[in-house]
Image (tube, grey):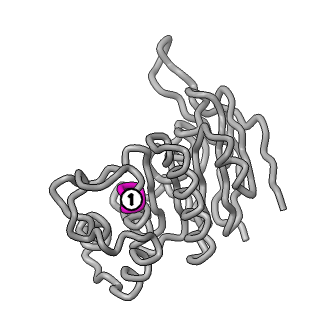
Amino acid sequence: MEVIRLESVSKIFGKGKSAVPALTSIDLTIQKGEFIAIIGPSGSGKSTLLHTIGGLEAPTKGIVKVEGQPIYSLSDEAISILRRRKIGLIFQSFNLVPILNVEENIQLPILLDHQKVDHDYYQDIVDYLGIKDKMYASPSELSGGQQQRVAIARSLIHKPAYILADEPTGNLESKTSEDVISLLQLTAQRYKQTVIVVTHDMKIADRANRVIEIEDGLIKKDVSYA
């Protein structure tokens, strides 16, 4: 089932002589449950593509639809609500709040949305990610791999349909990187999510069931694997 569609999406940063095209006339459809790796050299537009899909970067031209809804026709507030309720975002820098403990960091998206935490689901996530004994630790007391697990838990807490990860293992050692990607795959299967990962790491791309290669703002290759 199609859940995301991009129609002739272009993104240009700057104006006039300083204008830099990041994406050029991208057409793309994404099916429910896919695990997609977006690859390409630095500056190719892959992060811009991910951010455009995730409601973080409005295209200069074109339409982005999530579940049939053109998201950039929505108000800023409505886009924020869409992200909080439908999309789990994971970044290379983790973006944990240093003054909050692990539990508070994980539950933050739910509390910002003035919703109640599903405690059974919450316990399921932290047990599954192996961080149950870290709930009252501060981010500074965690290893890089533990911080990324907390970031993954935070991205899952509101039961999103889509997980978007931008270089989620860029700051991690090889073994921890493999563990994080395995966790993303397993959580996606367990919670029936669609996952899109931007990465430079071909080992991660090899784990995906679809690989999209971006070069100079264009889709160079788009290959699905059984």
State the residue lying farthest toward the left: 99
Secondary structure that dominates the magenta span:
helix
Q: Is residue 226 magenta?
A: no
Q: Residue at x 23, y 51 (%)?
A: 140
**How far across and down, in percent of the image, does residue 132 sit?**
34, 75
Crowdedness near tag 1: few (<14), some (14–19) or many (≥20) residues, C-alpha within 10 Å: many
Q: Residue at x 66, y 26 (%)?
A: 216
Q: Nearer the viewer, residue 19 or 137?
A: 137
- Please identify the quadrant where the N terminus is shown: bottom right
Query: If the image is split into quadrants, where does the C terminus sit?
Result: bottom right
Residue 107 position, x and y percent, is 29, 71
Outermost residue toward the right in this view: 226
Above-or-below relation of 219 to 75:
above
Please give the name of the residue rendered at 63% of the width and 60% of the height, measured from the top-left corner: 4
Can you give x and y, in whole percent of width and height, for residue 108 in the image? Answer: 27, 67
Could you say which is closer to the camera, residue 220 or residue 180?
A: 180
In the image, residue 126 sits, relative to residue 87, either above or below, namely below
Q: In this view, does 6 lie to the left or right of 112?
A: right
Quarter where residue 124 is shown: bottom left
Q: What residue type is labelled 1?
A: Ala
Hey, which residue is sitting farthest top in the picture? 17
147 in magenta = yes
Q: In the figure, is residue 153 to the left or right of 111?
A: right
Q: Look at the image and give the residue range highlighted in magenta.
A: 146-150
Residue on which disc 1 sits: 151
Give the percent coordinates (x, y) of residue 213: 71, 38
Total labels drawn: 1
Q: Which quadrant of the view contains residue 62? A: top right
**Front-lying residue, 119 or 12:** 119
- Residue name at image x 73 percent, y 37 percent: 219
Q: Is residue 137 left or right of residue 65?
A: left
